Amino acid sequence: MTDLPPLDLTADVLALTRALVDAPSVSGSEEHLADAVEAALRGLGGLEVERVGNSVLARTSLDRPSRVVLAGHLDTVPIADNLPSELREVDGLQRLYGCGTSDMKAGDAVMLRVAGRFGVPGAEPAHDLTFLFYDNEEVESAKNGLGRVARERRGWLYGDLAILLEPTDGEIEGGCQGTLRAELHTAGRRAHSARSWLGVNAVHGLAGALATLAAYEPRRVEIDGLTYREGLNAVGVTGGVAGNVIPDEASLTVNFRYAPDRDEDAAEAHVRSVFAQALAAGATLTVTDNAGGALPGLAEPAAAAFVAAVGRPARAKLGWTDVARFAAFGIPAVNYGPGDPQLAHTREEHVLVDRLQPAEDALIAYLSGSPA
């Protein structure tokens, strides 16, 4: 990848979104886009800017009585033959197609437009502002750039409210689900398939666990008026040695999306209880990733004020986002961005053009203290 052209923060939000989308930044390869974002923010002249790996941090220091943190990730899932971006009219609506349009470079573009408005000398936002553009959100949580910021520059995360520009289709989404991934492993005895009775088939040993998952009925949980839907699903199966061998090992990968009234330990305990019969029969369960969710926190004054400014009711966030990291520090956090979460990670990923400017306008109005 070569150096990218400079980002023009005076360009309209559609042009800026296209520029970001056309800069490939699959998780682990965000360096050049981070360089461009850093240069653009430093060029504004009114922000303190720091770099942590491939995360770019910027903030105002205007001695305002409150601080709002805006955050968004720079990385995308792997490209699916959907770059460069393409502007098309479908069903009478302009849509920008391309990898990362919805998740979440449209949100990043809105953030950069806000920075361009309030990050220049003489700007008068109602709050001090912090902007966090980070890497490696789409992979395991251990690599998450915001996690690294929390470890190395924790003070940069603090504020009275954090707004994650994750795709919400222009709605406010409160809190987030937790997510747990685990491997259920069965062991058997290898044998020639012509004499299968001499072996124990480890793949067959997964049958009971798969039947349990097929019959599983997930909870729906209402918290602060928002309804969270849980889900426990098989997302992968591995096993097999050769076409004439009874396999002696097999694994089932499961993903549990849990409501934020469970913590990580409760989520693991629930998964183990679901597979109690398989575990009693000798299977083993290894948790490979477990990131807790976040309660809505919409009763907090700063969050309530933002909901009121946007003027639309909040709904539950069905998915994990980095609002959980802010919630862990006691900072109210919400998700609000122009992308459609149902299009995230798809080949046909796109963002409706008419969602872009309203998201920018709502944030500008709130951050300037003006009515939305």
Image: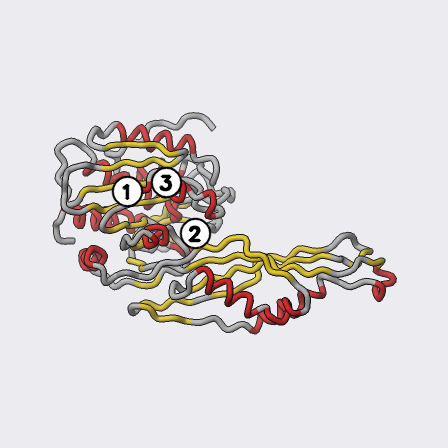
Q: Which marked residue is nearer to the observer: mark 3 or mark 1?
A: 3
Query: Could you say whether the residue bearing mark 3 is in a helix, strand or loop?
Result: helix
Residue at the spot x=47%, y=39% of the render? Answer: 26
Q: What is the CA distance from the residue labelled 3 to the residue labelled 1?
A: 18 Å
Of residues 32 and 273, the one nearer the viewer is 273
As drawn, which residue projects farthest toward the right? 195
Q: Measuring from the top left, give residue 266's x and y in whole percent.
A: 46, 65
Label located before the other in sequence (2 or 3): 3
Q: Which numbered disc covers residue 269?
A: none
In 3D space, how far apart are the residues under numbered discs 2 and 3 (Cα atoms)? 25 Å
Disc 2 vs disc 3: Cβ atoms closer than 8 Å?
Answer: no
Location of residue 292 by image quarter: bottom left
Among the two numbered marks 3 and 1 on one chain, the one whose residue lies closer to the N terminus: 1
Q: Under tag 1, what secondary structure?
A: helix
Residue, disc 2:
344
In the figure, is residue 243 to the left or right of 31? right
The x and y percentages for residue 180 are 49, 58
| Amino acid identity at mark 3 | Val
Q: Residue 111 got which mark? A: 1
| Residue position for label 3 | 149
Type of amino acid under label 2: Ala
Would you call the spot at circle 3 few (<14 residues within 10 Å), some (14-19), or many (20 or more)? many
Q: Amino acid at mark 1?
A: Met
Q: Say which residue appears at 12% left-offset and 50% top-offset.
A: 370
**Where does residue 29 sit, x and y in percent of width and height?**
47, 35
Point 27% across, 46% down: residue: 158
What percent of the width, then of the height, locates residue 214? 58, 70
Q: Nearer the viewer, mark 1 or mark 2?
A: 1
Image depth: mark 2 or mark 3 in front:
3
Q: Earlier in the sequence, mark 1 or mark 2?
A: 1
